[in-house]
Image (cartoon, grey):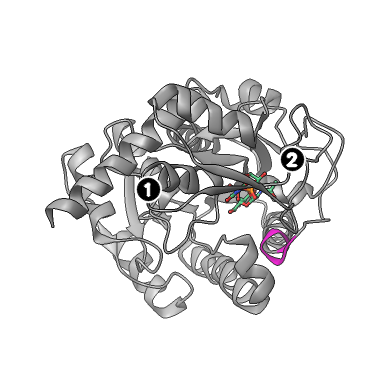
């Protein structure tokens, strides 16, 4: 297999995927302007894989710069992670989301077309299923009623890819619908780097446990679930990363045109309170928390049917929520130790 452009390769899921790619003998070429990451992620990544990786510090929505990268690197495939992903921000600034998320995929497809690159793995999200009571969701569950502008950008990007592949039978596309990616690399060398106050649950839990936040607010305990808090399918980022390697290998084996979508979750839902208590038990630390009102835009429950990923990609998760929460805490402690020594 030739080189793979990894847009957003310095991000949370992107960096973990680069590690798994190198370990599987693949050749990632990172395209990332680090707007949502830091140099330390690149240094950490290279430490884990024990080699330097090519990185192009450009905005992947900049067609001329991306064109030059393709010219220079001559890739045969792309994994497109680069996107904005904060649900609340997308409500406040929807045009930023429509412009960045849809614009960058559009630019990428044009550049791929120009250079004859036909294989693409796209980061989608379970957010495309919106609020559903048909659980677990399968890839054929209805989509399109997303709860936020962020969610709609994923709906539109998926449709753009379906239309583009219908018009170009040589295009081979895999769309991966992530559930809730959490955890960190077990080495403690790379992990999630939320900028400012975390929006997502697990980074907030680790920061509250570390004393960086006064307390976690659990958004609602009056949902009709087993303990009243929302249910999500938390998947370890390393399991998620490995699915990208399998997706690339699967695409390369296809003789026919392909445009397939896969759910990437564990298949098990956990409540917010279960996540808090599992974190406390696994790490032996308390998480100060209060119960607050529901958060606008939250769905009550979401978890995956993973039959298709298992049967077609041969993928299944190996790591548990407890593993992810242990690794997330390890990572939080690494950041704290680095800050203390700098
Ligand atoms: C959502 C999307 C997901 C997307 C992600 C991007 C859905 C079902 N999921 O994840 O596809 O990739 O945004 O950010 O649309 N919580 C608290 N207190 C907090 C933070 C979160 O109680 O301080 C709760 C939330 O109410 C939710 C759970 O924790 O029930 C997970 O929240 P979060 O980590 O923000 O992810 P989602 O909103 O599920």
- Secondary structure of residue under mark 2: loop
Q: Quick check: is 267 in the magenta stretch?
A: no
Q: Is residue 319 left or right of residue 71?
A: right
- Secondary structure of residue under mark 1: loop
Alpha carbons under labels 2 and 1: distance apart: 24 Å
Residues 171 and 175: in front is 175
Mark 1 closeness class: few <14, some 14–19, many ≥20 residues within 10 Å: few
Which residue shows up at 54% across the image and 28% down it? 277
Of marks 2 and 1, which one's residue comes earlier in the chain?
1
Per the picture, the main secondary structure of the magenta-coloured stretch is helix
In the rendered structure, are the residues bearing label 2 and label 1 in contact, judged by CB atoms less than 8 Å apart?
no
Which residue shows up at 61% across the image and 76% down it? 99
Q: Which of the 4 quarters of the picture holds residue 275?
A: top right
How far from the left and from the top, in percent, is residue 274? 61, 28
Query: From what the image shows, is residue 158 above or below residue 246?
Result: below
Q: Which of the 4 quarters of the picture holds residue 24?
A: top left
- Magenta-tinted stretch: 148-152
Residue that carries the numbered disc 1 in the rendered image: 211
How far from the left and from the top, in percent, is residue 115? 45, 64
Query: From what the image shows, is residue 247 above or below residue 58?
Result: above
Which residue shows up at 53% across the image and 41% down it? 181
How far from the left and from the top, in percent, is residue 66? 40, 71
Q: Which of the 4 quarters of the picture holds residue 272?
A: top right
Residue that carries the numbered disc 2 in the rendered image: 221
Can you say which quadrant of the picture contains the N terminus? Answer: top left
How far from the left and from the top, in percent, is residue 25? 30, 33
Which residue shows up at 59% across the image and 67% down it? 101
Q: Is residue 109 left or right of residue 239?
A: right
């Amino acid at each position: 297999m030739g080189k793979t452009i990894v847009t957003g390769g310095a991000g949370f899921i992107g960096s973990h995927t680069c590690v798994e790619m190198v370990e599987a003998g693949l050749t990632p070429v990172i395209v990332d302007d680090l707007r949502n990451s830091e140099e330390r992620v690149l240094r950490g990544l290279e430490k884990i894989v024990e080699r330097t990786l090519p990185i192009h510090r450009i905005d992947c929505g900049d067609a001329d710069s991306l064109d030059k990268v393709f010219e220079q690197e001559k890739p045969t495939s792309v994994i497109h992670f680069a996107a904005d992903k904060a649900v609340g921000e997308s409500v406040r600034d929807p045009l930023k989301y429509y412009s960045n998320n849809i614009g960058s995929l559009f630019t990428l497809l044009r550049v791929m077309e120009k250079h004859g690159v036909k294989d693409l793995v796209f980061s989608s999200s379970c957010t495309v299923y919106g609020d559903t009571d048909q659980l677990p969701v399968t890839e054929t569950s209805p989509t399109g009623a997303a709860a936020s502008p962020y969610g709609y950008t994923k709906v539109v990007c998926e449709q753009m890819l379906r239309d583009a592949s219908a018009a170009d039978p040589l295009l081979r596309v895999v769309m991966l619908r992530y559930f809730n990616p959490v955890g960190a690399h077990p080495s403690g060398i790379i992990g999630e780097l939320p900028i400012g106050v975390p929006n997502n649950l697990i980074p907030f839990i680790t920061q509250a446990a570390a004393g960086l936040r006064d307390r976690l607010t659990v958004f609602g305990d009056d949902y009709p679930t087993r303990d009243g808090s929302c249910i999500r399918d938390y998947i370890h980022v390393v399991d998620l990363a490995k699915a990208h390697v399998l997706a690339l290998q699967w695409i390369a084996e296809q003789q026919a045109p392909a445009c397939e979508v896969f759910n990437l979750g564990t298949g098990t839902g956990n409540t917010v309170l279960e996540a808090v208590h599992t974190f406390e038990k696994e790490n032996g630390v308390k998480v100060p928390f209060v119960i607050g009102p529901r958060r606008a835009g939250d769905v009550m429950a979401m978890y995956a049917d993973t039959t298709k990923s298992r049967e077609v990609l041969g993928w299944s998760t190996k790591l548990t929520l407890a593993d992810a929460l242990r690794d997330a805490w390890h990572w939080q402690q690494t950041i704290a130790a680095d800050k203390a020594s700098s």
